[in-house]
Image: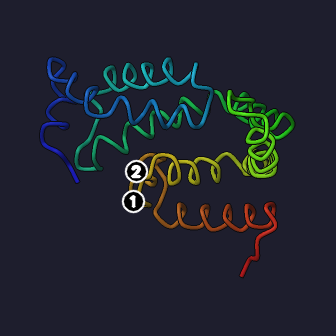
Amino acid sequence: MIVVSDVASVVDAERFGAVFDAHYEEIRRYIGRRLDLDVAEDLAAETFLVAFRGRDRFDAARGAVRPWLYGIATNLIGRHRRAEVRRYRAMARAGPAPDDEGHDQRVVDSVAAEVTVGRLSKALARLSKGERDVVLLVAYGELTYDEVAEALGIAYGTVASRLSRARTKLHRSLGADVR
């Protein structure tokens, strides 16, 4: 769906602030889920800088502004891919961070989170970049298959096949039944 105000904002430098206001927080959250929160702020800002500088190349006929921004953010995340994989591996080794709850609750939370976070982090680190991008755009960005295809510049069928392969790998890694 193309939102006229978004399209006009992308093309018109004076109105680009509307795109920023409408989508910044969502893009920052997506990046924060993929990378460290400290990096999210910088990469979200860089996403909008890249979008602003490339706004004349935005083609509303190809899709909406939101997936275009997710595509830019995903490309920037790709530059940080090695750090992302290292982060998942470190999370898998370290387990959850301690919090300020009582000792008993921390023990229960720690045991449950170690199993979940560690196994999921290892499983995500084992996916190919393309599979991980698709999974996290769907899971964290809550994008539709069409929007993921737009964001990554790939075919709808490629999104479906990457997601299917990733799900199978994740199920196997996490010990779930694969049918």
Coordinates of residue 165 in the picture (x, y in percent) = 68, 65
29 relative to 120 in the view: left or right: left
60 relative to 112 in the view: left or right: left
**Residue 177 sits in which quadrant?**
bottom right
Coordinates of residue 133 in the picture (x, y in percent) = 59, 47
Packing grade of label 2 (10 A; few <14, some 14-19, many >=20) is: many
Q: Residue shown at 35%/26% (left/top)?
A: 51
Q: Tags 1 and 2 in contact by the CB under 8 Å rule?
A: yes
61 relative to 139 in the view: left or right: left
Q: Residue shown at 57%/48% (left/top)?
A: 136
Between residue 15 and residue 111, name the one nearer to us. Answer: 111
Classify the position of the N terminus by image quarter: bottom left
Residue at the disc numbered 2: 150
- Tell me the SS state at disc 1: helix
**Residue 90 sits in which quadrant?**
top right
| Residue type, numbered disc 2 | Glu
Q: Residue shown at 76%/38% (left/top)?
A: 106
Classify the position of the C terminus by image quarter: bottom right
**Residue 65 sits in which quadrant?**
top left
Question: What is the number of the mark on residue 146?
Answer: 1
Between residue 11 and residue 109, name the one nearer to us. Answer: 109
Residue pushed farthest bottom?
179
Residue 110 position (above or below residue 8): below
Q: Residue shown at 81%/61% (left/top)?
A: 173
Coordinates of residue 8 in the picture (x, y in percent) = 14, 33
- Tell me the SS state at disc 2: helix
Q: How is the image coloured?
A: rainbow
- Between the residue at mark 1 and the residue at mark 2, the CA separation in whole angstroms equals 6 Å
| Residue type, numbered disc 1 | Asp
